[in-house]
Image: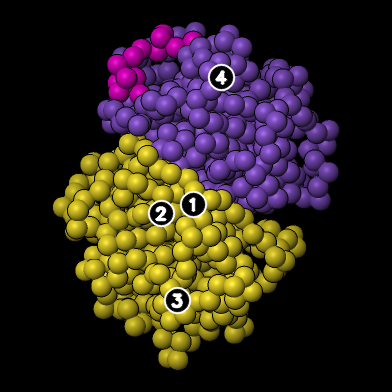
Chain colours: A yellow, B purple
Amino acid sequence: MAQRIGTSTVLLESRPSVLSFAAIGGKKERQGPLGALFDATSDDTTFGKATWEKAEAQMQKLAMETALSKASIRPEAVDFVFAGDLLNQCISSSFGLMALGIPFLGQYGACSTMAQTIAAAGVFLESGAAGLCGAVTSSHFCSAERQYRFPLEYGGQRPPTAQWTVTGAGAVLMSEHKPEKPYLSAVTVGKITERGVCDAKNMGAAMAPAAADTLAAFLRDTHSDPEQYDLIATGDLGLVGSRLLRELLRREGIELSGNYRDCGLLIYDREKQDVHSGGSGCGCSASVLCSLILPKLAKKELRNVLFLATGALMSPTSVQQGSAIPCIAHLCRFCA
Amino acid sequence: MAQRIGTSTVLLESRPSVLSFAAIGGKKERQGPLGALFDATSDDTTFGKATWEKAEAQMQKLAMETALSKASIRPEAVDFVFAGDLLNQCISSSFGLMALGIPFLGQYGACSTMAQTIAAAGVFLESGAAGLCGAVTSSHFCSAERQYRFPLEYGGQRPPTAQWTVTGAGAVLMSEHKPEKPYLSAVTVGKITERGVCDAKNMGAAMAPAAADTLAAFLRDTHSDPEQYDLIATGDLGLVGSRLLRELLRREGIELSGNYRDCGLLIYDREKQDVHSGGSGCGCSASVLCSLILPKLAKKELRNVLFLATGALMSPTSVQQGSAIPCIAHLCRFCA
């Protein structure tokens, strides 16, 4: 049985395992520091499809198929797949995963989706409702620009606080506990947090308070300190947001040290790749988790990791109507 | 522990209870046959807000607050809330429920969201991760028209197969088993189904195959027949879709009889209210469940109900790109 402790943390006593995982990336992601670690990348970011939306759906399919293939598992063996993305009505997930024929539960957590889908899969496994679950998400620079900002052809200027939406996807296959595999030991589900930031070109600032709240809640709920973990990785706060996170936590007496990283700063070389404050998007934390973090857990180079993905829950309509940006952060603790 | 049986059904052995529920509606819904059964309705469909999107968010807030108040429970006591809606990035849910400060897991199942949120809440309760969960969804005629079709001012013509998006919301508060309360005994999670229907003005036809697949899967998984249930209620197939559902099931040797109803046909008077094929939207099944079906379960006038909500997972972008409409249906079995 799962055990709920403190304000919003769940301990997963059955230790659901990470059986397999896969990371897919675009051209720019391949050129970044993690490029060689992706399972597959595409030269032209269309992944052979006619539209960017279809390319993004194809990335989810490829990520899930690759994770299945690495574990020698057929899609029919998967009980449920939890998936979501940034596109309106989450069409990357529904169109991407439809052909696999797995019972589907669509999730919406914006860029926190990788943590949310893993958390949900973990609880379903813990309950006995499932023996094998998928958790999948994606983002695509071109589909996100078109939907959230401007058509690419417009050539809009980006301020230094802006982040670059990662073209990437990640899929994690989770099962009942298997010895020798990394496992999910706890999750903290975030509350929606809004501190008045209205600037959709500064997502790091909007999301940092949500990350601070969820991480502080987890540390309080588990009576632990940041230095007990090998790695604390936020999803896509970027340079601006991760500095703010350190500052916000410092005010609560929590000091993040050298074990803190942000996936948005790991995926690109900011000196050479012109991404301003860093990477963002569901695919940012998903592809860094599946290319860098989970492989190190599988090899036991890391043994105790907090993965904290943040999401900005606004829409272009809510921004146009003058509303500030509500944000959320969910945390997964992986052990090996 | 939950038990997974057959292809995609989960039996909830702990029998999570429906502690409380609330239905909110607009003006047209109040004028319909269920009008007197709503907990609250608004005269002008703006619910006192400046935009329709904010009105829809307000309906979710009102639904959840009313369900909490009917059970004399404070929001702080709720472990998780599962919520989603039709608007881009599910802003009705995030903006509507933010002030309640409950750990939040956004769901996207289009018009199947009420069943999906209840199913997820049920499994979380079963796992021990939660003792009290909310499940909330909404839709609003005006925000849906603006987003999916045309601005209302355009005055677009509606074909006879079109449905009318319900302005309504429903919230269900679920807890560990409480004697005397209705409970959730099983859920079936649907697969994404697409049979080539491209016409976004005929959602009933697009969604009927998903409903048929999920209902047939449940009956097969549980070795039961339609006549064993007091009521089988689909979410929003409307006249066209519910006729198709009967026909599709007949081909599989399953006969739906007088115990079958569609929420989209229950909520409006089709003779007087000019809604063409019937009601639709997340708020359709949600408000009928919470105004008509759950009250009858609570009074034991119904004892064994299948609630089968369907969703069309397309977006305006996917329709413009010529893709057919992928659909899904999730089933909840309630007992009293």
Check disc 1 and report its element: helix, strand or loop: strand
CA–CA distance between discs 4 and 1? 28 Å
> Label 3, on which residue?
A260
Q: Give percent across and percent down for residue B122.
A: 47, 33
**Front-most of A202 and B298?**
B298
Q: CA gap, disc 2 to disc 1?
A: 7 Å
Image point (60%, 31%), residue name: B172
Residue B22: x %, y % from top left: 67, 29
Query: Is tag 3's residue or tag 1's residue first in the polypeptide sequence?
Result: 1
Amino acid type indicated by mark 1: Thr
Residue displayed at 16% across by 52% down: A72
Q: Is residue B224 magenta?
A: yes
- Which residue is label 2 attached to? A186
Q: Are marks 3 and 4 on the same chain?
A: no
Height in image: A201 above or below A77? below
- The amino acid at mark 4 is Lys
Labels 2 and 1 share a subunit: yes
Question: Which chain hosts label 4?
Answer: B
Q: Residues within 10 Å of mark 4 (few under 14, many from 20)?
A: some
Does residue A124 show up magenta in the picture? Answer: no
Q: Position of residue B192 (x, y in %)?
A: 38, 40
* Tag 3–tag 4 contact (CB < 8 Å): no
Up the image or down, A280 lies above or below B29; here it is: below
Quarter-of-image position of residue B129 = top left
Residue at the extreme left of the image, as rendered: A72
> Relative to the observer, which residue lies in front, B208 or B286?
B286
Q: Which mark is residue B181?
A: 4
State the extent of the magenta-drawn residues as a range. Answer: B218-238
